[in-house]
Image: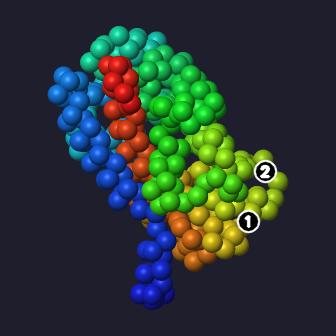
Amino acid sequence: MTISWDKIYIVLMKLMDGRKVSKEILLKLKDKVSRMHFDHIHPKLAVILVGKDPASLAYIKQKQKACATTGIEWEQFDYEPSVSTEELIKKIEELNADDKIHGILVQLPLPEKVFAPNVIRAIDPKKDVDGFTAYNLGKMFISTDFEDLAPCTPLGVIRMLEHYEIPIKGQEVVIVGHSNIVGKPLAAMLVNRDATVTVCHIHTKDLASHTKRADILCVAVGKADLITADMVKEGAVVVDIGINKLDDGRLVGDVDFENVSEKASFITPVPGGTGPMTVACLMENTVAAAKRLNNLNP
């Protein structure tokens, strides 16, 4: 099938380019980090990696590259899959007490034998740059003023909408997926900005009846082509947070991009949409944590 240049141009005009926006964020952070050096503050991220899962290694590489771009220091602690929950908690407690460490990240998923909730709970909320601890998740429900160290993917979605000047206030937003690290916190952040939010999930009856109402549709499930063009309103903003690897090796999102892009006013690509934004917001959180821990204005 041949795609016309006119169609390609129209789709490009609709793209919310996460790579472009994330680069702008990283450059601003690089300047902030440089100025922090004058106060003898060197933001540093500690990363705990268990095993050698290919996806985890790829994510780690992206995060390490972003640290190099911004000037954030990086220290990585590698463990075999046989590591115990107690060993990881002990290392986290050491990092909590280390004044040179400003952010702690545990790369997920962890092996089944490790009880991930206890590992995450051990992180000092002030150094929880992933935004996964109950404290940082809970305070987000108060208002936008308490969204410091918010989960990185939802924060990346908000930054993307802000960059493209997409209105949130008063909009009908539908989120497909209700995970603790994407769907639920994203819903809270959008409500904080006065959107009317519907959260759908695997037990939702008649998913399309909800998605068709959305001015802004956010999808984070992990199922290729879950959202088809007939499920999307003309002119909707579509944020595809899912990522799936097909048998031929291609990476795709949860949205049928080719057909949905013809109806959407804006749409994120996969890859190159919310992924780079997540990494950029991790760097943003690390710098913010370093400032707070050193009593500087955020």
In this picture, residue 21 sits left or right of residue 260: left
Residue matched to label 1: 212
Residue at (54% x, 30% y) in the render: 146
- Which label's residue is closer to the chain start, 1 or 2? 2
Q: Position of residue 51 (x, y in %)?
A: 38, 31
* Frontmost residue, 64 versus 245: 64
Considering every residue shown, the one lying at the far right of the view is 205
In the displayed structure, would residue 16 be above or below residue 194? below
Residue at (35% x, 16% y) in the render: 95
Tag 2 secondary structure? loop
Q: In the image, what residue type sits under mark 2?
A: Thr
Q: Position of residue 104 (x, y in %)?
A: 38, 25
Residue matched to label 2: 204
Q: Is residue 291 visible?
A: yes
Residue at (72% x, 50% y) in the render: 196
User: Within 10 Å of the Cα at label 2, are there few (<14), some (14-19), or many (20+) other Cα atoms?
Assistant: few
Residue at (24% x, 42% y) in the render: 30
Circle nearer the viewer, 1 or 2: 1
